Structure formats: structure tokens, C-alpha cells
Amino acid sequence: MNVMSTVKELSYCCTKNLHYVTCIIIGLLSVTAFGNFQMFVSKQSLSFWDSRTSVLSRFLWDLLLLITFIVQHSLMASSWFKVQMSSWLNISISERLIYLTVSSCTLLIVITQWNSIPEVYLWLVDTQRHFLLWLFFLLLHVTAWLLMCLEIILMDCGELLGFSQIYNHYNSLPWPMSKKARMLREIYSRMRHPGAILLTAMLWLHPLMTLDRLILACTLTSYIIGRHSFEMVHYEFAEKYFTLKTFQRESSVSYDYITES
């Protein structure tokens, strides 16, 4: 019995440590993907393109990349997929980590394989020759990214990345989402990603609106609008919740009332 219990304890410790190491690796991967996506969206220069390839071919290729990302993102976020992972693979605690890993890899593929189409454009402002315009777009995008990072922090970064699920599991703590208000869980089910409005603004407020950029902006904007549907009650609750969470102690009566709603 002692040998068996020792083996079980050793196996448990190995699994726990492996999970923690995996969290670190996936965290680095997600930071890499996010950083590359920032450059991809905000850089004031064109991506790679092969002038020998026709405009139509590059258009279809970029569209295929975007469709692949959206299908992966939507399928793995669906309740059906989560149930299958939980029932077939029995890895519900790692579901968010797996989703983050595949999404980061897919996003990196889109970024690295993207082809610019400078031959066709709506507008093309050369900010390299106009310092003030370059500075304007730079400050605009930097501000938007900083606000998005603030939103991520407010939305519980650990739970969003899947780290809290792992930590709580091995420390016998409640599931992260179970501690959140009912209305907040409903909001998260409608909008899992922060910065939807900020991202939409950055996609369109850019000096180089080439055909590939137009495809990117139209596709992601349509996806954001289609996936994120709110009612006024959700906006009102979110404003009260995050204001109290930021500026009042969690032991306050107001905060307790909001979190129970």
C-alpha cells in the first residue's frame, strides 16, 4: 500500500509540475502571437508579397487564411467542442490552454503566410515622408493596445489564458468562473475577447488600406459584430461591476450585491 500510494503521489506531482511548465510555455507562445499580431495590425508598412503571383491568387489565399482562423476560433469555442473534449479526452481543466495554443499557432500561420496586395487600394498614405502623420497613427495604435491590455487585466487574465483553471484544480479551489457573477458569465459567453471596439478601430484607422488590409478589416469586423451581441442591461452591469472592482474593496456591500446578480 505504501508503495502504491508513493507511486500515485509521485505521478500526481509529475502531472502537476508538467501542467505548470506547460502553462509557462503556452504563456510565452501566446505573448509571441499577440506581439506579432500587434505588429501585423499596426505597422505602417506592407507585408511580404510576390509580384509574380496574380492579385486574384493573393486575394483568395489571404481569404483562405482568414476563414481557417475564424473556423478554428469558432469551432473550438463552441459548447459542442468543449463537451467532446471533456467527455472523450477527459481534459476539461486544460480546455482553455489547448484552445489558446491552437489559436496562437493558427494566428502565427496567418501572419507569416499573409500576402500584401498593394496594386489595389482604397487609400495609401505615405507616412514615411510625413512625420506628423506617422506619429499620429503610432500614438493612436499604441493607446489602443494599452487600453486593450488594461481590459485583459480587468477581465481576469489568468482565467482568460487558462492558468487559473490549472492552479485552482491542483489547489482544490473553486472553478474560476463559478466565483463570477451570473450576469458576468453571460457577458463572457457573448464576448470572450476584450478590446473588440479597439481592434475594429485599429483595423480601419490605418494609413495603408490596400486590398488585403480591406479583406482583413471587413472579415474581422463582420466576425466581431456577429459574435458579440449585447443588450443595454449587459453594458450597465459591466460598467457597475468593473467600476466597483477597480475602485472599491471586494468586501464592500455594493460589490457583494453586484457579484451576486
Image (tube, grey):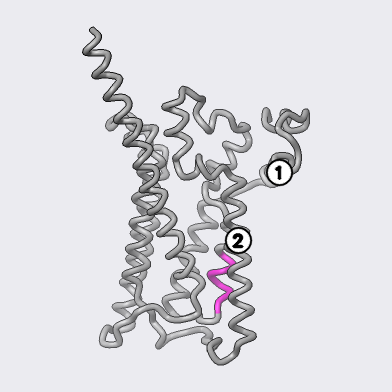
Looking at the rendered structure, the secondary structure element under dot 2 is helix
Q: Which residue shows up at 39% across the image and 42% down it?
A: 23
Query: Which element type, helix, strand or loop, lies under badge 1?
Result: helix
Other residues around mark 2 within 10 Å, as few (<14) / some (14–19) / many (≥20): few
Above-or-below relation of 227 to 201: above
Residue 63 percent across, percent down from the top left? 36, 68
Q: Is residue 74 magenta?
A: no
Taking depth in this image into account, of 103 and 11 the one nearest to the observer is 11
Residue 37 at x, y = what percent?
Answer: 45, 64
Q: Which residues are magenta?
A: 200-206
Quick check: 211 above or below 89? below
* 203 in the magenta segment: yes
Residue type (three-letter) at the residue carrying disc 1: Thr
Quarter of the picture containing the N terminus is top left
On the image, numbered disc 2 is attached to which residue? 146
Amino acid type for the residue under numbered disc 2: Leu
Query: Residue at 58% of width from left, 38% of height from top?
Result: 186
Q: Residue at x 27, y 13 (%)?
A: 5
Horizontally, residue 245 falls left or right of residue 43, namely right
Instruction: Give the CA separation, mark 1 to mark 2.
Output: 17 Å
Q: Which residue is mark 1?
A: 246
Q: Residue at x 37, y 48 (%)?
A: 26
Q: Nearer the viewer, residue 170 or 96?
A: 170
- Label the magenta part by its dominant secondary structure: helix
- In the rendered image, residue 94, in percent from the top left (x then y), is placed at 37, 36
